[in-house]
Amino acid sequence: MWQTISAELTIEVEGAPPSVVEFIARLQSDAPVLASVDRLSTTPIAALGEGEFRIVASRPEGSRQTLIAPDTATCADCLHEIFDPSDRRYRYPFTNCTNCGPRFTIIRDTPYDRPFTTMAGFAMCALCAREYHDPGDRRFHAQPISCPDCGPRLRLVDRAGAQAHPHPNPFSGQGEGRERRALPGQGERREGKDLVGRGKGKEQPGNPIDIAARLLAAGHIIAIKGLGGHHLAAAAANEVVVSALRARKHREDKPFAVMAADIGAARQLAVIDEAQERVLSSARRPIVLVPRRPQAPLAAAVAPGNRFVGVMLPYTPLHHLLCDALDQPMVLTSGNFSDEPIAYRDDDAMERLGAIADFFLTHDRPIHIRTDDSVVRVFSGREMPIRRSRGYAPAPLALPLCARRPILSCGAELKNTFCLVRDRSAFLSHHIGDLENYRSLRAFTEGIEHFRRAFELSPQLVVHDLHPEYLSTKYALDLRAVELMAVQHHHAHIAACLADNGEQGPAIGVAFDGLGYGADSMMWGGEFLIADLCGFRRGAYFEPVPMPGGAAAIRQPWRMALAYLDLLYGDELPAGLEVFKRNRSHWSAVAAAMRAKVNSPMTSSAGRLFDAAAAISGLRDQVNYEGQAAVEFEQMAEIAERGA
């Protein structure tokens, strides 16, 4: 008899030696879809003469080294079930199995057993219990297992929480006779086989999804409770409603993400190559930034001034059903006001989103930890995460060396994530956001406590940004009985790139950034560092210039244009400068304060240089979101240009 042990699982297997050897080999070669076998060791033990397979209850005592799986998109088998009229889970929006469904967002504690998830309040019916206990079933020990008889239920309510009813507009032409799509991978639909299309007889009167689709088509904004929080949805081709969503959400220009029903529908919106399709269709289902088609059926307000659009495919049964019923792309953006964390608790969502959404498509399965959608780009065929969250977190990243003690890294102020480290594993958190208000700070602190409890990890070393005024730094400084370490912002960027590529350095690292507190107390951002994982030397940097008005220069790029023009020309500005003409009334006063070094900190930031170039080019004197001037300046580049 042999005992196979990992940090997550102990398996005792008994049988003839050749069979045991084959079993051990197949643990790695034929592992389940969501299994991660990082290391496997075997130990011979005495045979017990047992002849049946069983899973024993998890033991809560002892050190918990269990990993937590990310939430995973609906698998092909479950997708087929929800569109099969003969299946008992037909059109059930919470269908899942061991190969897909919610994980990270519903786990309250480890080990990952149903009583420690937000599914604890849903008692399994007899049929689900039979599937759950059958080793030959796809739902064997699927902790979120449920069905229409025993699982979470969907409802559609208005802002006051009252049940919503079909809109008075009959929406004629939305049902019969429309072209029907095939299930992913099934090719063209056979005549008369109505599994997916909203054809005759498919719509169910009073079904919340069908009513929600009709409301979206009529131009309403709906808050939808997803895996990790609430989204705000609107018909993506409707200029009026997308503009209204921007106004209500206080999000002037920052692009919205769009959900398309399938890869075919996504190709109508954007030019998508094979590598991008692979990422879009993966089990992680991130938002992928892809080149927008000039004639795409999208409102201009979806991504103003941007030739790229963020596209994603459905990743829950609810999304699949809603996209199928709507039969057009929809904006799906975080349920929040700008700069706030996504709303994930039902009462909080009703309170915070009531001024934005007309209706709420919600359900009674609690979300334990909020998680935004992930955002990636594909560069030279390689997936490049921009925001690593749902579908990725909290899967560990492998480090090139082993940590001698547990570490907490608190991250920076903007686009914050935190990280816990144990041995060679870095557990990078979901996206927290900008730590600039109480709600974001609370999401940050609650997230750290959840990770510490779930991974049973008490940090001995706490790492924070060098900037003394970041809320993440202040959090670290308030901790007791830990060793603290301050890390320069751009060294952290470069060290992360080294670790991400399995390197230790030294290397020449180039950090083009907005702002980061420098070792000389100046604001850095255009840095060439000779660095390894432990330290760095500043080899070169952009010539520092003042930031007239301090933080005002970030919001008003014309001020950075003034700083660079003053550095180059002084009072003898070139004739005909439009940026000067547009800001003539403030120019002299701002220049005088800058020269007097009043509220004008010095910076080597590449981001501020790009801001200046954008303002001088006539693009933008004022921004509505962080990095907007640089983003729009990039859009001016000729894609086909390859140099002389």
Image (spheres, rainbow, N blue to C red):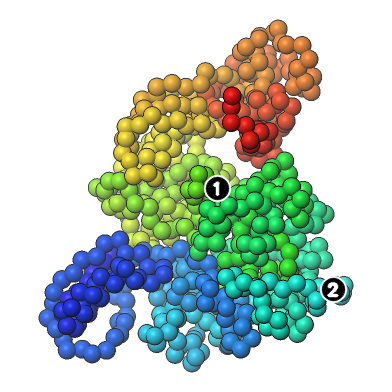
User: What residue sits 62% from the left and 62% below the top?
Assistant: 263
Q: Is residue 197 visible?
A: yes
Label 2 crowd bin: few (<14), some (14–19), many (20+), radius 10 Å:
few
Q: Are marks 1 and 2 in contact (CB under 8 Å)?
A: no
Residue underneath mark 1: 377
Upstream in the sequence, badge 1 or badge 2? 2
User: What residue sits 61% from the left and 53% below the top?
Assistant: 272
Image quadrant assignment for residue 93? bottom right
Percent position (x, y) of residue 454? 38, 63
The image's mark for residue 583 is none
Left or right, residue 639 beside residue 466 = right
Percent position (x, y) of residue 205? 76, 83
Q: Secondary structure at mark 1?
A: strand
Q: Locate the N terminus by quadrant.
A: bottom left
Label 1 crowd bin: few (<14), some (14–19), many (20+), radius 10 Å:
many
Q: In the image, what residue type sits under mark 2?
A: Gly
Give the alpha-carbon distance from disc 1 to disc 2, as whole Å: 38 Å
User: Does residue 222 sit above or below 12 in this rendering?
Assistant: above
User: Does residue 348 sit above or below 507 in this rendering?
Assistant: below
Q: Is residue 260 visible?
A: no
Residue underneath mark 2: 173
User: What residue sits 30% from the left and 51% below the top?
Assistant: 424
Q: In the image, what residue type sits under mark 1?
A: Arg
Which residue reaches farthest bottom?
126
